[in-house]
Amino acid sequence: METLTKQKCTACNKDAPRVTPEEEAQLKPQIPDWQIVEVEGIPHLTRTYKFPDFQTALNFTNRVGEIAEAEGHHPALLTEWGKVKVSWWTHAISGLHKNDFIMAAKTDEIAAQFT
């Protein structure tokens, strides 16, 4: 299987398939530090990154925003002093799509550039 960071997001609509439990079991090992949490009954991939100061956290947030815009798939981002919480899910299907796993992996790749 091709690594998630090498894949591109595909356009989603309300009929796009959610990730099955079997697919989740295959994809999750590529993003081991991410948690799947339910928010108002909708699963999200969530991770909090820590940084030495607000400027670094803001720079990371902007880089994630740039890749999100390029891929056409956008997260929830909460930027605070020294940390950024990132949540990926697919609004159109109120759940997780493969795109969310792709973007989580790409977010980890960006974070690695800040350490």
Image: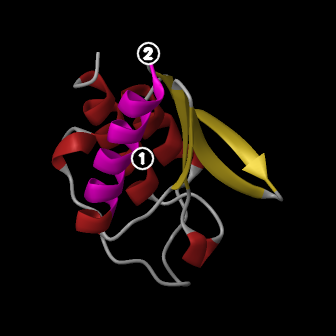
Q: Is disc 2 surrounded by few (<14), some (14 to 19) or many (20+) residues within 10 Å?
A: few
Is residue 31 or residue 63 the one in the foreground?
Answer: 63
Q: Is residue 17 left or right of residue 105?
A: right
Task: Find the magenta span and give its range.
Answer: 53-68
Spot occupied by residue 59 in the image (x, y as percentages of width and height): 33, 39
Instruction: Name the residue furthest right.
Output: 40
Q: Is residue 42 above or below residue 59?
A: below
Q: Is disc 1 surrounded by few (<14), some (14 to 19) or many (20+) residues within 10 Å?
A: many
Q: Tell me the residue that label 1 is attached to.
A: 101
Tell me the distance, in whole angstroms, between the alpha carbons under discs 2 and 1.
Answer: 26 Å
Q: Nearer the viewer, mark 2 or mark 1?
A: 2
Is residue 34 visible to the viewer in this orientation of the structure? Answer: no
Q: Mark 2: which secondary structure?
A: loop
Q: Quadrant of the C terminus?
A: top left
**Which label sits on residue 66?**
none
- Find out whether residue 1 is within the magenta segment: no
Which residue does the image show at 35% across and 38% down from the upper left?
60
Q: Mark 1: which secondary structure?
A: helix
Spot occupied by residue 36 in the image (x, y as percentages of width and height): 64, 39
Spot occupied by residue 61 in the image (x, y as percentages of width and height): 40, 44
**Magenta part, dominant SS:** helix
Spot occupied by residue 49 in the image (x, y as percentages of width and height): 49, 26
Is residue 1 or residue 9 the one in the foreground?
Answer: 9
Which residue does the image show at 52% across and 56% down from the upper left?
19
Q: Tell me the residue that label 2 is attached to.
A: 52
- Amino acid type assigned to the residue bearing label 2 in the image: Pro
Q: Is residue 51 above or below residue 26?
A: above
- Amino acid type assigned to the residue bearing label 1 in the image: Phe
Q: Is residue 71 above or below residue 85?
A: below
Is residue 77 visible to the viewer in this orientation of the structure? Answer: yes
Which residue does the image show at 57% across and 44% down from the upper left?
45
